[in-house]
Image (spheres, rainbow, N blue to C red):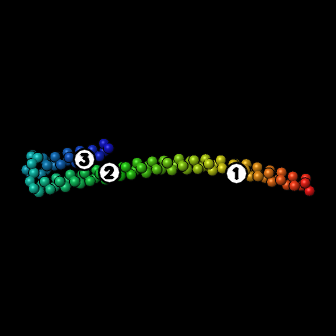
Amino acid sequence: MRADWAGIGATTVAAVEGSYCLLPPLNSIATNRNSTASLVALIFVGAFISVLVRLLRSNHDRLKAALIHADELRAALDEHAHRGPSRIRRANHLCERQVLRHFQVCARGN
């Protein structure tokens, strides 16, 4: 938020200084019609750039947060993937034992 006001403040200072030092009549803040149009254009462009920079910074912050979140999700998936095979092996082992018991029970019955 400070950057927004800094850009607008810099634009205002540039407009006042430009009006006083560069535009006729010199050494006066008063301007003629042509100079006023130039000052308005300067202020408009400065404000527009300030808004664009703020939008860029906002999008950058959101993208950075999204990347951090994606890294956290990737780490959680990696952790789950490492734990997953051992769970599958345990489940397979339990199934094999149940199948073996079933065959043993069937073999005893015959």
Residue placed at 80% from the left, 54% from the top?
Answer: 99
Decide which of tag 2 and tag 1 comes sooner along the chain.
Answer: 2
- Rate crowding at label 1 as few (under 14), some (14 to 19) or many (20 or more) other CA atoms within 10 Å: few
Q: Which residue is mark 2?
A: 53
Residue 26: x %, y % from top left? 9, 48
Quarter containing the N terminus: top left
Disc nearest the viewer among 3 and 1: 1
Q: Which residue is mark 1?
A: 88
Residue placed at 40% from the left, 50% from the top?
Answer: 60
Q: Which mark is residue 8?
A: 3
Residue 22: x %, y % from top left? 13, 50
Decide which of tag 3 and tag 1 comes sooner along the chain.
Answer: 3
Q: What whole-number distance in Å separates the C-alpha atoms at marks 2 and 1?
A: 51 Å
* Kind of residue at disc 3: Ile
* Kind of residue at disc 2: Val
Quarter containing the C terminus: bottom right
Q: Is residue 13 left or right of residue 58?
A: left
Disc nearest the viewer among 2 and 1: 1
Residue placed at 49% from the left, 48% from the top?
Answer: 69
Q: How many marks?
A: 3
Q: What whole-number distance in Å separates the C-alpha atoms at marks 2 and 3?
A: 11 Å
Helix, strand or loop under label 1: helix
Helix, strand or loop under label 3: helix
Q: What whole-number distance in Å separates the C-alpha atoms at marks 3 and 1?
A: 61 Å
Q: Nearer the viewer, residue 51 or 34?
A: 51
Residue 92: x %, y % from top left? 74, 52
* Kind of residue at disc 1: Ile
Q: Nearer the viewer, residue 21 or 3?
A: 3
- Rate crowding at label 3 as few (under 14), some (14 to 19) or many (20 or more) other CA atoms within 10 Å: many
